[in-house]
């Protein structure tokens, strides 16, 4: 049994015992048995439970099993496919399958590729290291319909079309084909593509070049070229020769093709009506239209990659920062924030800029009218973590959420339906429900409501909200508390509470911090009556955590997984509690965590620049000072998908 599975079994043993007791109490009513046949493609294997045919039986419910797929060196896991259907999360190498009948599944692997990003006029495309492709933005012509692409090694984006090279050297394309720019079906042995306004260029492995689409200015006249790199601009095409010289064809009204005297070039980029070249010494040259200053790159040094948009130019420096010149009407050159570090690649669209960081994350700046910059959460001021979903409050009072519903998971109860929320000042996430506090003191909620946990419509004068497993808590301006939802353990019995300054909710309890620094609790019994000097509280599945004014931390509850091991913590400024783990934010903006490491939920030692933490079921979330998000732990149901990650 793999180590991760052994840890999960230890953490979940209580649940299994409860289930067994329930089955015994009801006497059982039959056993279900089904066969599962498991196989894999070249490039990897299924290491648990293995490959072949296995029989699974269970009483009372459908049987199931964990699945673990591992890729060989040079390959990446892509997805599970099967008949009658794939596992619970077909995109996860580690997942679960429940059997309702005999089933056959296959783990699919593709050769590993280098992640990259590409930008069209109003859309953005990302290539993952497993050969799958993402796209956001304008989809008027279907240019973002790339979800079924597999085995991709290179991508390019034109004005309204997207092109990709497959691992076998053939090419696929989607989007606008008004000029034949998608007519690439017969191309073979291609290793790189470029896309212009209405034309597509392909570089074959022997250095020859092919092109289709609009040729009104000769931009497709590349028949005699022998090239190592290609680029496509608005209506011109550029090629880099092996000797460092450059050739260009197409529209030249602005001098964008005047590259004949360039030497020692290592990379080329083509913009709307200009061309950029990166020299081996890290300096940059440019020719063509300079109306917006997009060619003002003569002072750049230490550049390792360049990109050209419609009228702006971007360069990646050797230290991982980026520089930009040109049109900045929509903020496409505003790339100096703390998040624009550790950059490995940039691409420039008509009015937006996209970058790939060394951790595989993608960031963007500029025009987002068509959602072309929606490659990750930004401008977040607070995060909350629930059972299977993560919620983010944006600076404009709107809310975003990812997880079970956004991923169409088994626990889809509408808990991510927050797209129409506005004027929100605080958010909380429960087991399968989400609560938002509005600036007028009223409260909204979505998700599962079988215990009445989001019956908050009549709440007023609320200044803080919290959510437990199946209940919601509201702190009123007068220091009293209201609670709705599951009261099996008495977690809603807060009627006599007064002088409360802060509230928290665990799976089976409600905790209140009084203005004098003492703590009260309702529900599952916790010995917090002796706590003093507390400034913040948090509650997990079966434990409660208190942050003291001196930066130390106390904890009580069922602590068998080490989640209460906080005695040595110092300089803590905020705490969060998950299922079996506790997370602490230190004054230097680093993070520590203790408890069960079932899915890596405590792997936060490398986090820096954090200003708030949250803890979900088996994962942790951190809000960085640049208002972006980091997450570690169980990514099942996409609960950690708070932005594009192109590295598996």
Image (spheres, rainbow, N blue to C red):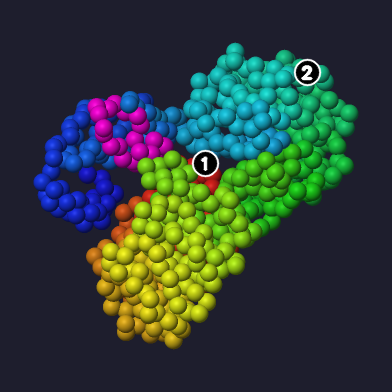
| Location of residue 646 in the rendering, given as x and y in whole percent from the top left corner | 52, 41
Q: Mark 1 points at which residue?
A: 646
Q: Which residue is drawn at 82% across and 28% down?
A: 257
Instruction: Please determine whether, in this image, residue 413 is positioned above or below residue 529.
Output: above
Query: Looking at the rendering, in which quadrant would you find the C terminus?
Result: top left
Dot 1 surroundings within 10 Å: few (below 14), some, or many (20 or more)?
many
Judging depth in this view, the residue of 311 and 237 nearest the camera is 311
Label number found at residue 215: 2
Cα gap from disc 1 to disc 2, whole angstroms: 34 Å
Q: Which residue is drawn at 52% across and 63% down?
A: 443
Q: Residue at x 60, y 67 (%)?
A: 440
| Location of residue 167 in the rendering, given as x and y in whole percent from the top left corner | 50, 24
SS at badge 2: loop
- N-terminal label among 1 and 2: 2
Range of the magenta residues? 85-105
Judging depth in this view, the residue of 33 and 266 nearest the camera is 33
Judge left or right: residue 427 versus residue 337. left
SS at badge 1: loop
Observer able to see residue 301: no
């Amino acid at each position: 049994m793999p180590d991760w599975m052994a840890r999960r079994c230890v953490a979940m043993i209580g649940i299994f015992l409860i289930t067994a007791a329930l089955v015994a109490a009801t006497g059982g009513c039959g056993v279900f048995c089904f066969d599962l046949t498991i196989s894999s493609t070249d490039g990897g294997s299924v290491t648990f439970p293995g490959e072949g045919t296995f029989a699974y039986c269970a009483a009372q419910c459908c049987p199931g099993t964990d699945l673990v797929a591992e890729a060989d060196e040079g390959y990446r896991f892509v997805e599970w496919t099967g008949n009658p259907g794939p596992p619970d999360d077909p995109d996860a190498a580690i997942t679960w399958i429940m059997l309702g009948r005999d089933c056959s599944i296959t783990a699919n692997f593709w050769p590993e590729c280098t992640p990259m990003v590409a930008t069209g006029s109003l859309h953005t495309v990302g290539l993952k290291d497993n050969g799958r492709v993402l796209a956001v933005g304008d989809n008027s012509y279907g240019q973002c319909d790339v979800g079924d692409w597999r085995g991709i090694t290179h991508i390019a984006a034109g004005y309204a079309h997207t092109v990709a090279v497959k691992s076998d050297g053939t090419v696929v394309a989607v989007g606008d084909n008004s000029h034949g720019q998608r007519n690439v079906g017969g191309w073979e042995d291609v290793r790189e593509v470029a896309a212009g306004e209405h034309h597509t260029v392909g570089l074959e492995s022997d250095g020859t070049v092919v092109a289709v689409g609009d040729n009104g200015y000769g931009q497709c006249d590349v028949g005699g070229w022998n090239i190592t790199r290609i680029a496509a601009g608005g209506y011109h095409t550029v090629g880099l020769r092996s000797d460092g010289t450059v050739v260009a064809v197409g529209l030249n009204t602005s001098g964008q093709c005047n590259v004949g005297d360039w030497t020692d070039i290592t990379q080329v980029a083509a913009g709307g009506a200009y061309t950029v070249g990166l020299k081996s010494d890290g300096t940059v040259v440019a020719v063509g239209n300079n109306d917006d200053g997009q060619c003002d790159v003569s002072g750049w040094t230490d550049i390792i990659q360049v990109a050209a948009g419609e009228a702006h130019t971007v360069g990646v420096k050797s230290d991982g920062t980026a520089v930009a010149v040109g049109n900045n009407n929509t903020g496409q050159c505003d790339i100096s924030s703390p998040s624009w570090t550790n950059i490995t690649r940039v691409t420039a669209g008509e009015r937006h800029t996209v970058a790939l960081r060394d951790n595989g994350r993608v960031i963007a700046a500029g025009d987002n009218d068509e959602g072309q910059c929606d490659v990750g959460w930004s401008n977040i001021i607070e995060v909350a973590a629930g059972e299977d979903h993560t919620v983010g409050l944006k600076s404009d009072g709107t809310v975003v959420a990812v997880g079970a519903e956004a991923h169409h998971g088994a626990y889809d109860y509408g808990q991510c339906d927050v797209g129409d929320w506005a004027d929100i000042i605080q958010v909380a996430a429960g087991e399968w429900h989400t609560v938002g506090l509005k600036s007028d003191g009223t409260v909204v909620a979505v998700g599962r409501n079988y215990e009445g946990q989001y019956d908050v419509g009549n709440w007023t004068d609320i200044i803080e909200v919290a959510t437990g497993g199946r209940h919601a808590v509201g702190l009123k301006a007068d220091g009293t508390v209201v609670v709705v939802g599951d009261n099996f353990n008495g977690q809603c019995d807060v009627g006599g509470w007064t002088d409360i300054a802060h509230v928290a909710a665990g799976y089976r309890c409600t905790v209140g911090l009084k203005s004098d620094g003492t703590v009260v609790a309702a529900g599952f019994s916790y010995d917090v009556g002796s706590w003093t000097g507390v400034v913040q509280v948090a509650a997990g599945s079966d434990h409660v955590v208190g942050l003291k004014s001196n930066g130390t931390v106390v904890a009580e509850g069922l602590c068998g997984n080490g989640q209460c091991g906080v005695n040595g913590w110092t300089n803590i400024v905020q705490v969060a509690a998950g299922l079996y783990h506790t997370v602490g934010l230190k004054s230097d903006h680093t993070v520590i965590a203790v408890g069960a490491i079932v899915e890596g939920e405590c792997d936060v030692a490398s986090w820096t620049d954090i200003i708030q933490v949250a803890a979900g079921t088996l994962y942790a979330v951190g809000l960085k000072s640049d208002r972006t998000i980091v997450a570690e732990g169980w990514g099942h149901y996409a609960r950690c998908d708070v932005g594009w990650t192109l590295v598996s």
